[in-house]
Amino acid sequence: MSVRRTPGIPRRARCVLLAVGLLALSVAALSGANRGDPVAIWMRVIGHPNIDAGSNVLLVFEDPPGVVLDLQGPGIRVVHEFDSIATVVATPEGEGLLSARGYRIERDDSVKVVGGASYSYDYTRGPASIPLALQMEWRGWNAMYPFIIKSLGPVPPSYLSDLRGIGVNITESSFLGSCAFLVEMRASVIPRVMELPYVAWVEPFHYVYRLYSDVLQWVADPRNCCLQLVPLGVTARPGVPGARLRSDLLSVGAIIRGSYDSSSGSFVDVWATGPSAYAIGRLDSVRYVVTSWPVATGPGDP
């Protein structure tokens, strides 16, 4: 048992041609996606509808406690007030007004880092490029997928009921702190989720987010050929039995060094090559993958 260490064409005609062209591209993308290909359809159906260009998400605090916040003014949109904090979307002008009123303000950072990996999502620019092998495949509108839902600031528990009411299964309600949820839902539910005023963005929980930066760096190093092994620590997805995780790991060529099962979950130490590290990250039973010991060249503890 081991323990984790864890042109000359009239303007109107040009517009019509552009619209027809975009429609054709969309149909082509959808057709490819329905064949199961990893395509850019994710970026067509998932976005950030509640962030205006040039605006920032601000947390305005009741400081001192009980102070009545004046959140009115041009360039200020109140999302909600919860637990002595008001979340607003504000233009630079609106932010200046709130600052002039003496309120304590913090910006809700527009960039996320998931799983320790250097893959980030900016509210105004969209997601970073993700390696094709580590993207979640498109399997159709009615398939179930893991998603990350990022809220605009912390939200009250009642908001979770809203999500459940439209078919969202919340698997982690405190993912990335108190302002994001890890969920499972059908892709067809995405438009309804994006209509909620407190949702900042929705994105698939891509396989890359399961691999910590140290694993990604090791796999990307050209000196690490397919025969060199790295010791990895693999954490099971919540609710997945340790026996299933171990079986899945063996199916992709991992060498099990030890495991630890407890009421809080299961963890397995393995030896794996670079290609199998990617395969491990794609297993449905896996939650996170980290390097657990310094890199060695063969089985056995270094």
Image (cartoon, rainbow, N blue to C red):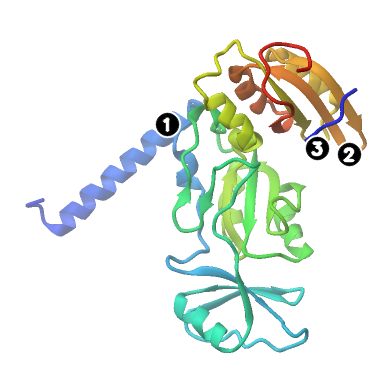
Residue type for callout 2:
Ser
Spatial separation of the CA atoms under disc 1 and disc 3 = 34 Å
Asked if the residue under mark 3 is in contact with the one under mark 2, i.e. CB atoms within 8 Å, the reply is no
Q: Residue at x 21, y 48 (%)?
A: 17
The C terminus appears in which quarter of the rendering? Answer: top right
Element at label 1: helix
Q: Which residue is mark 3?
A: 238
Residue type for callout 1:
Ser
Q: Which residue is mark 2?
A: 264
Task: Looking at this view, name the residue that lies furthest to the right.
Answer: 263
The N terminus appears in which quarter of the rendering? Answer: top right
Element at label 3: loop
- How many neighbours does mark 3 have within 10 angstroms: few (below 14), some (14-19), or many (20 or more)? some
Going from N to C along the chain, the mark reached first, 1 or 2, is 1
Viewed as shown, does residue 204 lie left or right of 83? left
Element at label 2: loop
Going from N to C along the chain, the mark reached first, 1 or 3, is 1
Q: Which residue is mark 1?
A: 31
